[in-house]
Image (tube, helix red, strand yellow):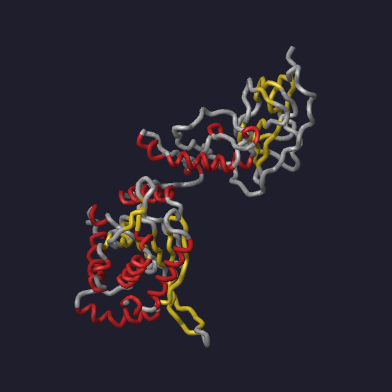
């Protein structure tokens, strides 16, 4: 005769109205005492609730998303005749104290993580043994723990097991995509914003849609690191202003950008890895013997990046003329596909608008992008006294698979030196 036992939520301390984020058992499962039944999450911590006895699950009385408190019924357990004496309820162990997102607001549907694209060695989904911290880590990555092979005693899954699973899945993503399977990421929750007030919908422009998809792909596929630095451009800016009148005689508008491009060209020659791309399979580095630099241009229809070719073979006036021409085409919407292809390195300058520093997104398959912000006068100590100097903040975002931190800061330091002493551009 069945010996049914109702398992309720034990005393979990000060936690009240906690959400069920995982149900770890199903009807018909055989469990042992101390096996986890559910995972709860509050705004302070997550915790697994263990079973106080062994047996077979007859009914599950809670579901993901339920809000429960002490004494609420969790499962009905059929204690087996050979089961050991019922063990006392073990207190749940908080995993961490990091803040977690609040439940979705009214009108917002909670997004469900999607599984990482399967690879050839995926196993059928099965019951997983893992700590709440590992379960949280897997949820953030969209990994189905039932497909992960645990390396710890009794097959328990560790954080390293999840990381290795993701690496294996990403390594096979190319072949999986060719087979019609793509890497799935958690979807953005759908929200009915009209419930909160008046709204208006406008269609994204064509450039925004195209560039948005490209930026999203670059962001999720390139491990970004950003290095920040400053350059004293006092002498360079004085020289540029002194040449403005002479340049106008030749119908050239001499901005700061041509000088910046020449400095970047010299830095790319000094650090050829920054002037490279990874092969499609990620196994080889393609070093480019040419230097084509893309320059982000703000247009009424969105941001575009036309490419100036062979920067190393052109002078400052040549670059200034070409920038005037291609920027005009960009703002008139007359750029062709060839005008935006073949770039080795990109410059995004917001100096004419404002701001201090920002983190630009790498324009893959390039491996680095320079972000330039507005220069300002600052007191700089020269060893004897403070002097007013024009200082330009800039940042370099780069693909960490190709460029390590030491090389990134060497590049920015070298570039700052070129901009600070214009004579070095002639060497």
Estimate the x, y position of residue 350 in percent, counting from the top left. Answer: 39, 65
Classify residue 422 as left or right of residue 89. Answer: left
Estimate the x, y position of residue 8 in percent, counting from the top left. Answer: 73, 29
Tell me what residue is drawn at x 71 percent, y 19 percent: 78
Q: Quadrant of the C terminus?
A: bottom left
In depth, the one of 52 and 179 nearer the eye is 179
Q: Quadrant of the N terminus?
A: top right
Classify residue 396 as left or right of residue 15. Answer: left
In depth, the one of 22 and 143 nearer the eye is 143
Q: Is residue 216 visible?
A: yes
Question: Residue farthest to the bottom?
Answer: 384
Question: Residue farthest to the front?
Answer: 284
Q: Quadrant of residue 276?
A: bottom left
Classify residue 302 as left or right of residue 334. Answer: right
Against 311, is 7 above or below? above
Q: Is residue 297 visible?
A: no
Tell me what residue is drawn at x 50 percent, y 84 percent: 382
Estimate the x, y position of residue 101 in percent, counting from the top left. Answer: 59, 46
Classify residue 285 as left or right of residue 30. Answer: left
Q: Quadrant of residue 399?
A: bottom left
Tell me what residue is drawn at x 75 percent, y 37 percent: 91
Q: Quadrant of residue 6?
A: top right
Against 295, is 34 above or below? above
Q: How many marks?
A: 0
In depth, the one of 108 and 176 nearer the eye is 176
Question: Residue farthest to the left?
Answer: 250
Against 102, is 385 above or below? below
């Amino acid at each position: 005769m069945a010996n049914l036992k109702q398992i309720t939520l034990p005393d979990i301390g000060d936690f009240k109205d906690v959400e069920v984020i995982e149900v770890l058992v199903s009807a018909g499962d055989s469990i042992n005492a101390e096996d986890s039944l559910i995972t709860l999450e509050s705004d302070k911590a997550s915790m697994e609730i263990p079973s106080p006895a062994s047996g077979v699950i007859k009914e599950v009385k809670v579901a993901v998303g339920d809000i429960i408190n002490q004494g609420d019924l969790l499962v009905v357990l059929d204690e087996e005749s050979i089961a050991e004496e019922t063990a006392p309820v073990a207190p749940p162990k908080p995993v961490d104290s990091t803040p977690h997102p609040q439940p979705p607001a009214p009108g917002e549907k909670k997004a469900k993580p999607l599984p990482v694209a399967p690879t050839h060695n995926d196993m059928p989904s099965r019951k997983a043994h893992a700590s709440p911290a590992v379960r949280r880590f897997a949820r953030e990555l969209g990994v189905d723990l039932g497909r992960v092979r645990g390396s710890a005693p009794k097959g328990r899954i560790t954080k390293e097991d999840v990381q290795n699973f993701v690496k294996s899945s990403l390594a096979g993503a190319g072949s999986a995509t060719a087979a019609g399977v793509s890497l799935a990421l958690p979807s953005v929750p759908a929200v009915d914003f009209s419930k909160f007030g008046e709204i208006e919908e406008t269609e994204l422009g064509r450039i925004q849609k195209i560039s948005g998809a490209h930026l999203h792909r670059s962001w999720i596929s390139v491990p970004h690191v950003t290095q920040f630095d400053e350059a004293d451009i006092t002498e360079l800016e004085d020289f540029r202003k002194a040449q403005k009148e002479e340049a106008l005689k030749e119908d050239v508008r001499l901005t700061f950008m041509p000088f910046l491009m020449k400095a970047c060209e010299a830095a790319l020659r000094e650090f050829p890895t920054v002037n490279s791309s990874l092969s499609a399979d990620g196994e080889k580095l393609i070093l480019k013997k040419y230097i084509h630099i893309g320059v982000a241009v703000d247009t009424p229809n969105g941001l575009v990046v036309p490419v100036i070719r062979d920067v190393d073979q052109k002078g400052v006036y040549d670059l200034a003329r070409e920038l005037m021409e291609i920027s005009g085409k960009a703002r008139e919407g007359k750029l062709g596909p060839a005008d935006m292809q073949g770039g080795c390195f990109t410059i995004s300058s917001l100096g004419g608008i404002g701001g201090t520093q920002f983190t630009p997104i790498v324009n893959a398959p390039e491996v680095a992008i320079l972000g330039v912000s507005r220069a300002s006068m600052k007191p700089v100590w020269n060893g004897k006294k403070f002097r007013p100097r024009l200082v330009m903040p800039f940042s370099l975002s780069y693909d960490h698979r190709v460029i390590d931190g030491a090389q990134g800061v060497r590049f920015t330091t070298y570039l700052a030196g070129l901009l600070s002493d214009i004579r070095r551009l002639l060497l």
